[in-house]
Image (tube, rainbow, N blue to C red):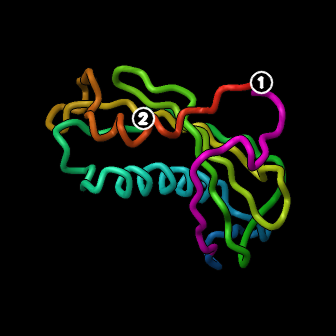
Amino acid sequence: MSDRPTRASYVAWRTVTTRWRDDDAYGHLNNATYYELFDTAVNAHLYEATGLDIRSLPQIGVVAETSCRYFREIGFPAPIEMGMVVDKVGTSSVVYRIGLFQGDSDDAAAEGRFVHVYVDNTDPARPVTPMPEPIRAAVEPLLRPAGP
């Protein structure tokens, strides 16, 4: 996806409050904070959608890849709306995209890519297949809608 995503690109939403400490010395959201927001969007969804403590499952999702495309600055004090969609559900992995929006703009201020790979909770070096059924059930409704 090379063009700038819009609100219509996402299927699940969460709003977070920005904090004074989220801004860097230049007065815009610190780069590390973007990745914290992506992690929060994904894991908060999994907790809520499964009703489980996902950290205690026999298989856990570890982050295998992240990236961020920045389109415009955002920061404190306005809230951030986070849109999420799943691009792919594999046998042991999930590929998410998370768009960050601040203000009334329909265009994302940033978009992150976040990949979870499911591994054995006692041996994280070992990917597992299939991923836990409660996780699959929580992420499949987020699959990118069909269309152009």
Q: Is residue 87 above or below residue 81?
A: above
Residue 66 shows in the view: no
* Residue receiving disc 2: 116
Q: Looking at the rendering, which quadrant does residue 146 occupy?
A: top right
Q: Which mark is residue 148?
A: 1
Q: Residues within 10 Å of mark 2 (few under 14, many from 20)?
A: some
Q: Is residue 40 above or below residue 70?
A: below
Residue at (83, 65) in percent of width and height: 104
Looking at the rendered image, the quarter that the C terminus falls into is top right
Q: Residues within 10 Å of mark 1 (few under 14, many from 20)?
A: few
Residue at (72, 78) in percent of width and height: 77
* Front residue of this view, candidates 87 and 124: 87
Tell me which amino acid carries mark 1. Pro
Q: Looking at the rendering, which quadrant does residue 5 occupy?
A: top right
Residue 93, given in percent of the width and then of the height, sits at 40, 27
Residue 101 shows in the view: yes
Report helix, strand or loop for mark 2: strand
The magenta span reads 1-18
Report helix, strand or loop for mark 1: loop
Residue 134, given in percent of the width and then of the height, sits at 28, 40
Residue at (74, 58) in percent of width and height: 101
Residue 113 lies in the magenta stretch = no
